[in-house]
Image: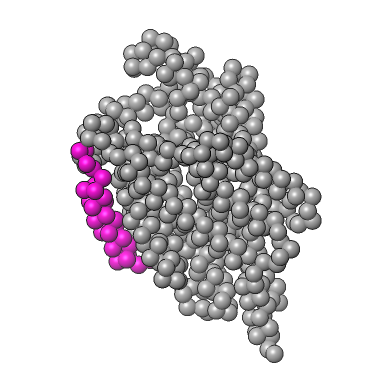
Amino acid sequence: MSVNDNNSQIIRQRLFTPPRTGDRIYKVVLFLWVLQLFEPARLLSYYVPLLGPLKWIPELLLYSTVFAWLISSRKKRGYPWFTAFIVLSLFGTGVALFGGNWGIARLINRQLLQYYLLALLSFTYINDEKKLALLFLMYFLYFFYYALWGIYSLKISPINPDVNPAARIIIPWHHQFDNRDGFGTAMGIGLAYCAYYYSISQRRTFRVLSGLSILLCIGGIVLSFARGVFIGMSITLLYIWYKSKRKIIGMLLLIVATGVVFVAVTFVSSGHNYWETMNTILTEGSSGGTGADRKTLWGWAWRVFLENPIIGVGTGNAGVKFVSVIPEDEILSHGYTKGKLWGRAIHCVPLTILADYGLIGAFIFAMLIVDFLRTNSRTRRVLYAMGGPNLHRPTTIIEENSTISRRYLVMSSAILACFVAFWVNALFYETLYSAFLWNLITMNRLLFVNVMAMREEQKALNE
């Protein structure tokens, strides 16, 4: 057997052999991802209140798995800047405690800690192509699943001509997608992800499902009636077209998306003019409606930051501090009362970071974002080096490895497009402490870890 044939056999065995039965913790980690993404415990407890204790199972299972991970002999992988942000959040809880309120901070820290621990488990146990591909598939099904719930919401919560459609409940059992801000943001990110996932779907079933998901996500964006989400969709589609190597196909996606928007508007705008709502982006801007509300909140958040510029006011505490920083007569003049203003979300992630954590927190968060972008860029550079200039035509390494390189490259681009979609929406909505950003950061790092391991293995085989 030649050296090349032997290398080919080793790589094929490494990349395409199912995980050994001894790797039981991996199966638990995968199940934890299912619980985090699809939240079956929350769904069951909503419709059957007696099952409320089920909501504790995902968290208890996570902590038990982390304990098993800590005492195992497996090599541990960390994430320094993610760890730094978790420490910052915990410190912010202490700041909030001394600032007079830390109830919101405790809830936020509990959720962020779960995202962080699941990330650490994933870095250790999702360590080959098949495992990572399964996570990518699960993330695709996540958007498909909630897009279907969005369509179903038209039955359980119809668009009433006499009621503002922006106030309707969309997915009543979900703590983030029950409102248009959270649901619309999810559909915007899902549109970006499904557009890329379509291109790597080899089976006809998945190509049909991913194509349908694109349509459903666009429909979900429309039925949210959210102006910021509409802006996010427009910018995301333009970004995908700009980054596309095949501009004609990218242009076709824009045309199809535009057509779907018009069809969806006709379908869901019963008694309401969707385009009139979107037109207020230009006619009202920040002078009326939610635009004026955000302008006021952003101005007050900036003043909260100026009062505490170094360490901020604490995790999730900016809205609480409004009532002590802003004079009561000014609060009343903008149509608020202290009771209604207390705890309000800022609806802008950059300002939330500044107000909650000050300049120190802004630096740590900025480094986390820089690390994300550098890691994503480095992943794609390594994949190009491994797969050659045309990843769809294997050149420098065996065919199986080149196919994986192309798949990884597409998913790296998908994660970056989702990141763009997130940040456009993050300028208008309070998404910092939701799962969107932290799942993208975890998946981006996870892809990077696997690509670096594949490169080192290839180097060892070539020596």
Question: Does 101 appear above or below 231?
Answer: above
Residue 58 drawn at (x, y percent): 62, 44
State whether residue 65 is above or below residue 196.
above
Is residue 258 shown left or right of residue 217? left
Looking at the image, which is closer to me, 463 or 318? 318
Q: Residue at x 42, y 68 (%)?
A: 205
Q: Residue at x 63, y 48 (%)?
A: 118
On the image, the x and y values in percent for residue 139 come to 50, 55
Q: Would you say the magenta stretch is mainly helix, strand or loop?
A: helix
- Residue 166 seen anywhere in this rendered image of the structure: yes
In depth, the one of 207 and 406 nearer the eye is 207
Image coordinates of residue 384 in percent, x first then y, are 52, 68
Q: Is residue 24 above or below residue 310?
A: below
458 lies left or right of 257: right
Q: Residue at x 50, y 67 (%)?
A: 407
Q: Which residues are magenta?
A: 244-272
Q: In which quadrant of the rendered view does residue 226 lie? A: top left
Q: Quadrant of residue 62?
A: top right
Q: Position of residue 406 (x, y in %)?
A: 50, 69
Q: How many marks?
A: 0
